[in-house]
Structure formats: C-alpha cells, structure tokens
Amino acid sequence: MTSRVNGTLATLLLLFTTMVFSGCEDTAPKPRLETAKAKSESCVEPTGVMRRTHMDFIKHQRDETMYKGIRTQKHSFKECINCHVPDKKDGKPVNYLDSNHNLNPDHFCATCHAYVGVKIDCFECHSDNPAGAAPVDANHAVGGSHE
Amino acid sequence: MSNIDAYRRRFLLGAGIASVATVAPGLVLRQVNAKPADEAVTDQKRWGMLIDVDKLPNGGQGVVDACKAEHGWGHEEHSNAEQKTQWVRTVKVTEKLTKHEFKLPVMCQHCETAPCADVCPTGASFKRVDGIVLVNKHICIGCRYCMMACPYKARSLVHEAIFDQKPDTPRGKGTVEACTLCVHKIDAGEQPACVASSNGAIVFGDLKDESSEISKQLKARGGKQIRADLGLNTGVRYQGI
C-alpha cells in the first residue's frame, strides 16, 4: 500500500517537474555579441569588468571630457562605438533602433540591453555608429591588464 | 640610422612642413599646438575669434554652411521656423541715419562672464577654464533660462528627436545647444570649422598669448564686441562693424 502511494507521488512529482520545465525551451533569445573589430585580443578592460562596470567607465570619461577636455581613447564612448559597431551592414549604417523602432539585434549595445531589459539613453544624443569617425586604429590605446 | 631615428626624422620633417604652410600668397596657416589627449585644459589660454566682416562674402553665409556641415544641425523636419536650431546666423544691420548696411555672422560670443551660465539651474551651462562656453547636455533639463538670458540669441532648444548625429557632436531632443567653438577640434589642435572655411577672414587663437596672430591683430587694429555696453568681455570680436 505504502509503496503504491510512494509510486503515485513519484509519478506526480515527475509529471509536475516535466510541466514546470517544459516552458523553458523557449528561452529569451541570447544577445548576439559579435566579435568587435579585430584591434586587440580583448577589450580595453577584461570582459567581466566591462560587463559589470562599462557604464561607470563611460560616465567617468564623460565628465573628464566635458569639463577638462581630456580625450583619451581608452574609455571613450566614441571609441566603443568605433570598435564594436560595424561601419555598414548591407550598405547601410547599423543603428541601435531598427526600422520599427525596436532595439536592433545587430547593434552591439542594443542586443544586450534588449536581453537584460535596461533602457539605453546614450543614443538619443550620441551617434550610434562610426559614421565619419576615424578608421579603427589597430594600435589604439588598449591598455589595462588583460585576463 | 636606427629605425627610431628614421621615424623621428620623418616625423620632424612632417611637423616642420605642417607648422607653416602657405595656402595662397599672403595667407599663411600656422598649426595650433595640440595638447596631449590626457592633459586637462588650463586657464593659461583663452580661445577667441576675430571676425573681419569686410572680408566675409555674403555676410558669412559660408560660415553658416561650414558649421552645419561640421555639426549636422539644420535638418530638423518637424520643427517650425522659430523652433529650428541655429548655431550661427547672419544678421543684417542698417544704420538709421546713413542707411549704411552690413551683415555679420552671430554665434555664441563665449563671454567671460556668461549670463547663460549664471542663470542655469543645474549647472549644465558652464564656461570651460579656457574660455569656451558649453552646455553639458547630460544634465541639461531643457528649461531654456539660458536662451532668455543670452543677449545674442545664440542658443537653440532641440525640439524633435535627432538621428544620425555626427560622432563629435552629440545632439538630442530637449537639450539646449549653441556654438561650441568646435571644442573637439580645438582639443585636437585644429581650428574651428568656420575659421578653416573663412579664407582668412576669421582669425582664431589664444587671447592670452601676446604673440598669437589674434592678439597681434587685436592690438594693431582693435576688435569690437557686440553689445559691449553689457561688459561681458566676449571671446568673439569683430572688425568692420
């Protein structure tokens, strides 16, 4: 008797577990983080640091540039775009919004910000593609310690 | 000769050519020395412009066009004429008695005591230590006090969403903007776009450096301020008005 109850419970548990996880096949699409233009083996800081604190680097540099005219390339927003966003795709600039004003999965910043659901304000003022920027300099100031 | 020596030689040769280049007879361009990118600007310099109105054809329309091309303004589609941005405009002046007419380009005059910076409630309008008056659009709330305070009508509010900005000129809806004196070019040791397009009619340089071309010309020929009565000690001066 007890073993039958146990058997039923185990079956129910298995069924429940299957039901719970069955919905997880359709996970949110992963961000499509294309490799940045081949300038260096890694970004200006180790990848983990950049993922957590890129906004702090950009904000710090923002004030340095705005008030003091310091325009080093290492943490420059313009240089982020210059390296991470393709010049053109199918002959057109890659914008952070697509033609339907949704975040464009082909844009490096937009693809990840869409995944994590964090609104991105930078491009309401800043250029979202390297239009007119100097071509990528393979020797630009990629500094800091690399992992 | 080592590689480094050869590199140095090429570099110095290049620099020598770049420092004094003759464009046309009587017109000589001198390189403005660039500061290193990691060095902060100082108050040892004060940037200014001297505009010779008589040498500018058509009241400086070429200056307006050069500014538009450099910074990408003037393409608003949904703003009306009063709302459209204008970083620089040509103004026609007629003297009432003599009917003498002349035109001049008017932009941010980069005042030493800038009224816009005085009235800004957030500190977004500010004067950089080297005399360039700017808007920090990151903290501008678009209240337009600065536009009311400016005696030169030099500033505009962006009334519509902007796309395809120039990488060196961030512009966005709800923020105030004006002539930046091409600060990104100055920091790179270049001249502002309007100066480069003016065929010698506008001289740009350091007002604190007595040996600079602008200081010499100001000393020799003088340079008027618009609304000098306000005592703002503008960085932009005019000849021929």
Image: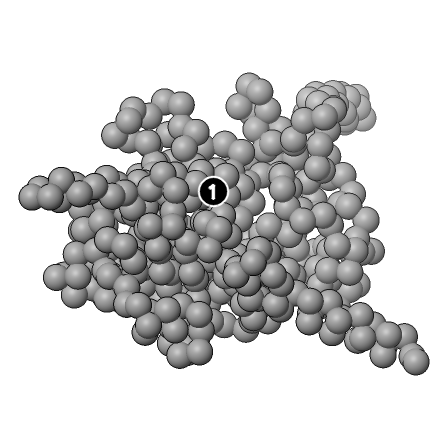
Q: Nearer the viewer, residue A12 or A76?
A: A76
Q: Is residue B41 left or right of residue A7?
A: left
Residue B162 image offset from top left, x and y in percent? 45, 32
The percent coordinates of residue B2 (x first, y second) are 92, 79
Residue B211, picture quadrant: bottom left
Say which element carries label 1.
helix
The relative height of residue A124 versus residue B222 in the rendered view (above or below) is: above
Q: Chain of mark 1?
A: B
Asked if residue B140 shows in the view, the reply is no
Q: Indicate the quadrant where residue A105 lies.
A: top right
Residue at the right extreme, as displayed = B1
Q: Residue A26 falls in which quadrant of the image?
A: top right
Residue A87 lies, in percent from the top left, at 70, 37
Nearer to me, B228 or A96:
B228
User: In this image, A132 relative to B152: left or right?
Assistant: right
The C terminus of chain A appears in which quarter of the rendering? bottom right
Q: Position of residue A140 (x, y in %)?
A: 73, 60
Q: Residue at x 44, y 66 (%)?
A: B205
Tag 1 residue: B66
In the displayed structure image, the side of residue B49 where residue A73 appears, left or right: right
Residue under the point 53% across and 34% down: B164
Residue farthest to the left? B97
Depth check: A99 or B75 in front? B75
Left-right relation of B24 to A41 = left
Q: Residue at x 74, y 74 (%)?
A: B12
